[in-house]
C-alpha cells in the first residue's frame, strides 16, 4: 500500500494536491488499522526474539512473540495479549 502512496511525497509540501492526498492517507490508515496484518522489525531477531504461530484447543491461532526457542509443541506458556492476534511470553527465558 505504501508504494502506491509514494508518488504523493515527491512534490514540495506546498504543491501537494490535498484533494487526493487526504483521502489516500485515510484509506491507507483504515487498511492498516483493520487489516489484522503484522510486521516485526528485523532488529527483534537480532535481539533474540522469535515468532511462532500457535493455536489453542478451540482452534484460534495467534502469533507468539518469545525469547525462547520452542522445541516442545505441548509446552505450557504464560502469555499476555498484545493485540487481537499477537501474544507475548511473559516468562521470557
Image (cartoon, rainbow, N blue to C red):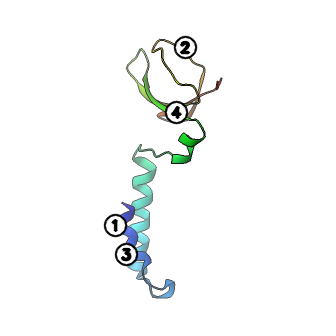
Q: For the residues marked 1 and 3, what is the alpha-carbon distance in whole angstroms?
A: 7 Å
Residue 16, position as x, y percentages in the image = 44, 83
Instruction: Identify the residue at the far front of this view.
Output: 46
Asked if 29 appears above or below 79 in the picture, the reply is: below
Tell me whether the residue at label 3 lies in contact with that at label 4, contact meaning CB atoms closer than 8 angstroms: no
Query: According to the image, label 3 marks what residue?
Result: 7
> Dot 1: few (<14), some (14–19), or many (≥20) neighbours within 10 Å?
few
Q: Which mark is drawn over residue 4?
A: 1
From the viewer's perspective, tell me whether residue 5 is left or right of residue 79: left
Q: For the residues marked 3 and 4, what is the alpha-carbon distance in whole angstroms?
A: 35 Å
Label 1, secondary structure: give it: helix
Does label 1 or label 2 sit earlier along the sequence? 1
Q: For the residues marked 2 and 4, what is the alpha-carbon distance in whole angstroms?
A: 16 Å
Query: According to the image, label 2 marks what residue?
Result: 76
Total residue callouts: 4
Q: For the residues marked 3 and 2, what is the alpha-carbon distance in whole angstroms?
A: 48 Å
Label 4, secondary structure: give it: strand
Q: Which mark is drawn over residue 50?
A: 4
Does label 2 or label 4 sit earlier along the sequence? 4
Q: Is residue 5 visible?
A: yes
Amino acid at each position: 500500500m505504501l508504494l502506491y502512496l509514494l508518488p504523493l511525497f515527491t512534490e514540495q509540501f506546498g504543491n501537494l494536491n490535498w484533494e487526493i492526498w487526504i483521502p489516500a492517507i485515510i484509506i491507507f490508515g483504515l487498511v492498516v488499522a483493520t487489516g489484522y496484518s503484522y510486521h516485526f522489525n528485523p532488529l527483534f531477531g537480532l535481539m533474540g526474539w522469535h515468532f511462532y504461530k500457535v493455536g489453542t484447543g478451540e482452534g484460534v491461532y495467534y502469533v507468539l512473540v518469545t525469547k525462547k526457542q520452542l522445541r516442545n509443541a505441548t509446552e505450557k506458556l504464560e502469555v499476555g495479549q498484545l493485540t487481537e492476534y499477537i501474544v507475548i511470553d511473559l516468562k521470557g527465558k
